[in-house]
Image (spheres, coloured by chain):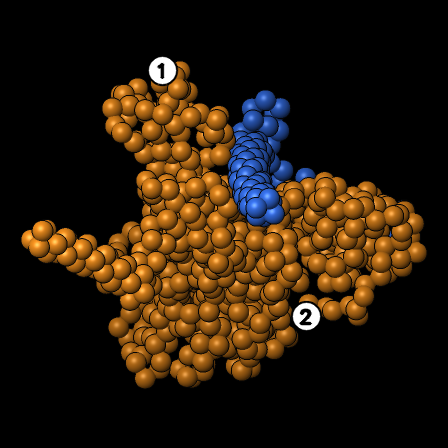
Chain colours: A blue, B orange
Amino acid sequence: MIRGRHWVAAWLVAFLATTWIVYARQTAAIRAARELTDLRARRANLEGHRADLERRIRTAESRAVLVPRAQARLGLHLPSDSEIVLIPAAGGSR
Amino acid sequence: MAKLAVRMQVVQFGVFAGLALLVARAAQVQIVQGRRWAEEAKAQRTERIVLAARRGTLYDRHGTPLAVTQETYHVGIAPNELRDPAADGALISRRLGLPSRSWQEALRKRYAYFAGPYSALEVQPLRTVRGVHLEAVLNRFYPDPGVARATIGRLGDDGRGGSGLEKTLDTLLAGRSGAAVVLKDRAGREYESPARVIAAPVPGLDVVLTLDAELQEIAQRALDDALRRMDADGGDVVMLDPTSGEVLALASRTREGSARPSAFTDTFEPGSIAKIFAAAGLLALRRVTPADHVSGEGGKWRLPGRTITDEDPQPSLTLADAIRVSSNIGIVKFAARLEPNEQYVMLRDFGFGSPTGIEFPAEAGGRLRPPSEWQRPSAASLAMGYELSVTPIQVAMAYGALANDGVLLQPTLVREVRGGSGSVEGGGGATGTVRYRHRPEPVRRVVSPAVAGALRELLRGVVEHGTGTEAALTNFPVAAKTGTARRVVNGRYAAGEYTASFAALFPAERPQLVLVVKIDNPHKGSYFAAQTAAPVTRSMLEQALAARNVALDRARLSTAVPRAVAAPIEDDGGVVPYVVPWPYHPDSAAVGARRAVPDVTGLGIREAVRALHRRGFRVALRGWGAAEHTWPAADDSANAGSVVTLFAQPSLRVAPSAPTRAPSSPRRPRR
């Protein structure tokens, strides 16, 4: 009789242990999924931020913005070819 | 009692029959129909979803992204789930840019949906708000929407390429969608549990275009300014590298501001810019000598059925004069020495009458009729550039053949196809292995190098002493031809309507750039190409020369000291590869030798830049950290003094300081 109860208890413990393992694994998986989702969101956010900054930099660097400002504020002008001196590639000489 | 026993038996039978029915039904459901019900149950608690593939990025030749795919969001709001409807509502409406009325309407709904799409930045503060449900979708963005819009094209409603290069390259860019199974609750909402991925999405390939974003901006701005100044109906600008057939810039505009890909799709009668091809036939077939003269007829020459006139009458003309002053009478008289078939074959060999084969949908082939369909004045008309319809890209390629010593190349818009990463990472630029790299593709030899050289000399005369002086630069020789042609409207030549065009080779010796400028129907000021399209060309050349990273080989343009170029570079420990001779000698330009690009992968930025400088290259830096790769790639050859773009990534481990690795394979010249 006692032996039978032990068997029942052993089965119960085994069942609870198995259930706990399954529960723990699922909990960990859901937590990992949440973290993954958060990381993806963070990456998307950073990518969006970078794209936005790159776009703003490119706009600020563009001729449409720079040329009129350089002309108006600094009195510069687009050079004619006679004002452009290209420096020759002279290889190894210093 | 007997009655009671009977009743009991009936009840027992009933119960038994009921149980039997239950068992039978259970057997039917579980055994006979088991598979069907199992599938139905599975369908109720799981859902198969499509995992969208990230579309490949389009870059310009220096790695500037022109079209990128980014994650964006649709936003769903469940008003009854909001903890603080007033505060949350204010935040949501502010982030989504909703007017208060729309928000009030949304609050009255059980579930409000805002398609957006909203960027990650816009929805970031909403992620923690209860009742806000974000649905991520991949969306196509064009960081600078105005740049080469017609050439790049756009996506259709189905997310596939709808026009332009997005359409042509769709199979490369699209990638392959994946699939996954997710669990759902009773209400059909997806559980947060991880999806079971059946097939992972395969991202599309990245494509590096031949376009140069800076030259493109120069071309677009110059064309916009010209159209506004001249009050013209529209125009096109094409710039390409004649040695590789790579298209560097393409701008097309109409008066209304729309950007149609007319450089590929719209044809026009080229007028005098086609005279050089009649000259090519005459020189190639030796039907004319430099000393041959024809009479200028006092500027007016009557032929049966038509009168040919010159704007600049000359008493007598050589072929060089006829090209220089763009004499209709001169070129028609000389072209009469060609048989119709010879004239036709020469034009056809320069690529007229058939599409160039560039990677663009719906490219027009133009019109060149065979001699059997010619009428009496056709030979004269063709010599002057009439009875022939061409696209700007065809003209550019034909002039490119003159620049390329007589070899016609196939034009291209695709420089490289890269795969493996599928996303924009690091400091920008395409990563991943190179799947395809463009090499010049000759179509045919049209004329000999000697004839091509002679034709370039004729074109040089146009800029130095002829109709193209407005395009002349002080220090750099330019070869070009003007063309002013009457426009056909509704099948007839319209009075007072002209197409002004200009085709130029820069510089005249060993040209690096072919420019074609076309202005449709200028209304203000002169309509002649000499006063309209030629100055636009000069302006673009000056801007290109002054720009930092445009695709010009400045070493070849510069005034190099020949023996300095020949000095061994590898022995040089310094980092100063350029020397300025003074005083300045404009005519001493020497050709920079082609050199192998060193492999600097893994080196620190400073060391990598130093190694590239030591080889005589200029360096454009993208990103920071350790050197990842270069354009042109390691072991490829490039002209000394040209720009090598160095891509760096912070994640790469910097290799210990070591001398630059020698190229692993023999140098491979591009041509």
Q: Is residue B106 visible?
A: yes
- As drawn, is B131 to the left or to the right of B247? left
Q: Amino acid at mark 2?
A: Arg
* Image coords of residue A70 (percent x, y): 59, 28
Residue position marked by numbered label 1 in the rendering: B86
- As drawn, is B477 to the left or to the right of B189? right
Q: Quadrant of residue A42?
A: top right
- As drawn, is B436 to the left or to the right of A85? left
Front one among B444 and A18? A18
Count of numbered marks: 2
Front one among A6 and B76? A6
Residue position marked by numbered label 2 in the rendering: B671
Report the residue at 32% width, 25% height from top: B79
Mark 1: which secondary structure?
Answer: helix
Report the residue at 57% width, 53% height from top: B422
Report the residue at 45% width, 80% height from top: B345
* Image coords of residue B546 (percent x, y): 64, 42
* Image coords of residue B547 (percent x, y): 63, 43
Label 1 environment density (alpha carbons within 10 Å; few <14, some 14–19, many ≥20): few
* Image coords of residue B667 (percent x, y): 78, 68
